[in-house]
Structure formats: structure tokens, C-alpha cells
Image (cartoon, rainbow, N blue to C red):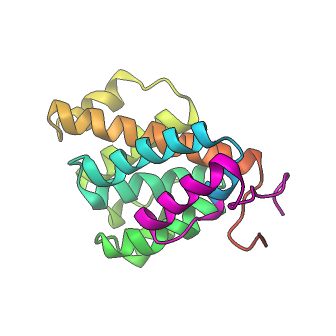
Amino acid sequence: MARIEYADLNRGEAAALARRIEAERGSVLHLYQMLLHSPPAAEGWLTYLTSIRHRCLLDGAIRELVIMRIAHLNRASYEADQHAPIALREGLRQDQLDALGRDEIPADRFDARERDVLAYADAMTRTVQVPDAVFQAVRRHFQDRDLVELTATIAAYNMVSRFLEALQVHSDDRR
């Protein structure tokens, strides 16, 4: 159960933004219903995460790989629940998704590029500072734009999991 009640989607500023979210996303997920307590925060969040997921050029499988790893590292079950089907549609395999929940990633499930991306996501998530060797390893796989988009994606989904877990937002919450 969430720590505070979900916002009323039919009140004030939240109502118009809730309709926009529904039009763009198909429904108002728990995450957005919580964010709608602050329509400016919800609107900024929506714009930023829509850009990360739908306007950036970063490969969808890489994007979902890091999102799922972050969800597991931060024990953010809602994030994992929402992104597992997307990750599978983007080309990740179920055995890869299962491996992302382990402390040590089995090397045989991922290619060199994916392992370097996971090491980068782990560093950004666990310690924030990225060792030079980890950065150099991931750098060899990406041009500048892709590297910036990868970094922004990892940062964004750490923000998501921290918000979800602080307020204890879960997929099975009644709204």
C-alpha cells in the first residue's frame, strides 16, 4: 500500500493532465496518479520520460536492459513489473531478465557490449561515481549521442525507482 493516497484524477489541474496522460499512454499508471499530486512535477516527468523512451535513438533493448537492472538493484518491483513485457518486446530473453536480478551477472547470458553497459549501470546505480575503466569499456561501444542517452536513461530510471520506493508505489495497490 502506498504511503499516501493516490491523487484524485478528476480534480483541478490534475484532471486535464490526467486526460493527456491517458491519451498519450493509454491509461494513468500508479506512478502518474501519485505524481499528479503535483501537476507541474507530473508534467515535467511525463515530458522527460517520454523523451527518454520515445524520442532518443538509444537501442530499445539496451534501454530496457538498464531499466530492468536498475529495478532489480533498487528493489523497485513496480518498475520491473511495468518494464518486463517491454523488455521482452524489445528483444531481451526471459533468461536474461532472470539473470538481471542476481548480484553477479552471469557472463554467458550477455555479449561484451551488454556486459559493459550493465557494469556502467551498476556503477551509476550503486556508487554514483563511475570508475574510469568502466567508462572506457562502455565508451568503445557508443558514439557521443548514444552515450549521453544511455547515461540519461540510467539516471532517469534511478529517479523513477527512488520515487516509487520512497512512496511505496506498487502494481497491486488499489486506487
The foreground one among 5 and 127 is 5
* Res 101 visible: no
Q: Does the magenta stretch include residue 13?
A: yes
Give the tally of numbered discs.
0
Residue 15 rendering spot, x and y as whole percentages: 62, 56
Q: Which residue lies furthest to the left in this view?
A: 143
Where's residue 44, x and y in %? Answer: 50, 38
Q: Position of residue 101 (x, y in %)?
A: 56, 62
Classify 139 as above or below 101: above
Q: Which residue is rendered at x = 65% and y = 43% of the image? A: 162
Q: Is residue 70 left or right of residue 107?
A: right
Answer with left or right where residue 140 lies relative to residue 131.
left
- For the point 21% across and 39% down, the residue is 146
Q: Residue at x 47, y 40 (%)?
A: 156
Q: Position of residue 74 (x, y in %)?
A: 63, 49
Describe residue 92's horizontal placement relative to residue 36 as left or right: left
Q: In which quarter of the image is residue 136?
A: top left
Q: Of 50 and 132, which appears nearest the observer?
A: 50
Q: Give the vertical position of 68 relative to 155 (above or below).
A: below
Check if residue 45 falls in the magenta segment.
no
Residue at 53 percent of width and 62 percent of height = 19
Task: Identify the image quadrant of the N terminus.
Answer: bottom right
The residues colored magenta run 1-30
Name the quarter where the C terminus is drawn: bottom right
Residue that protrudes farthest toward the front in the picture: 12
Q: Is residue 10 visible?
A: yes
